[in-house]
Amino acid sequence: ALTEARAGKFWSYACGVACRILTDYHVEGLVVENYYTSLPLKKGLSRSAALCVLMVRAFKQVYDLKMTVRGEMEYAYQGEIMTPSRCGRMDQACAYGSVPVQLDYDGDHLEVQKIHVEGEFNILLVDLQAKKDTIEILSCLQVCTPI
């Protein structure tokens, strides 16, 4: 699983999560059949984070792992950073589904709090038909961020 996670291919995210779970929980593993994928690749919609959360939840359900949603987020993040992607921590908030959450991150610790939102939100997604390079984006953000 570690070799595949580090390879940076399509299934690397799933393998990164499997590696983390197998290391910490000493379980047997899973066979996952993906028969349909609806989130498009390289569009900035957190597909990799959604896949990682899904993998954590599959392990959690099959092996009855005692884990909170915040724990799912953490394992999803730990699995994802085993890949070349080096994502940030925000995307794993998809673990909360359609519940709005506030993320407070100080560089060492992440706090997640459900929030109540009144009113209606209109979300517009636009496909600019452009290439997105997450590794390059995160690298540029790190250069601009004070230490």
Image (cartoon, helix red, strand yellow):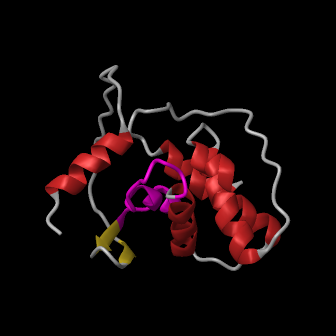
In the picture provided, is 21 more to the left or to the right than 90? Answer: right
Q: Is residue 21 above or below residue 90?
A: below
In the picture provided, is 133 more to the left or to the right than 75? Answer: left
Percent position of residue 23, x then y:
71, 71
Quadrant (top left, top right, bottom left, bottom right) of the C terminus: bottom left
In the picture provided, is 12 more to the left or to the right than 88? Answer: right
Q: How many marks?
A: 0
Residue reaching furthest to the top: 129
Residue, x 35% and y 32% (percent of image)? Answer: 132
Residue, x 55% and y 42% (percent of image)? Answer: 8
Q: Is residue 127 above or below residue 144?
A: above
Would you identify the image quadrant in which residue 35 lies? top right
Percent position of residue 118, x then y:
28, 61
Q: Is residue 141 magenta?
A: no
Quadrant (top left, top right, bottom left, bottom right) of the N terminus: bottom right
Q: Main secondary structure of the magenta part?
A: loop
Asked whether 143 or 10 is in front, the reply is 143
Residue, x 38% and y 58% (percent of image)? Answer: 88
In the picture provided, is 93 more to the left or to the right than 51? Answer: left
Percent position of residue 102, x then y:
32, 68
Residue 65 appears anywhere in the view: no
Residue 19 appears anywhere in the view: yes
Q: Is residue 80 above or below residue 115?
A: above
- In the image, the segment drawn in magenta is 82-101
Would you identify the image quadrant in which residue 137 lies? top left
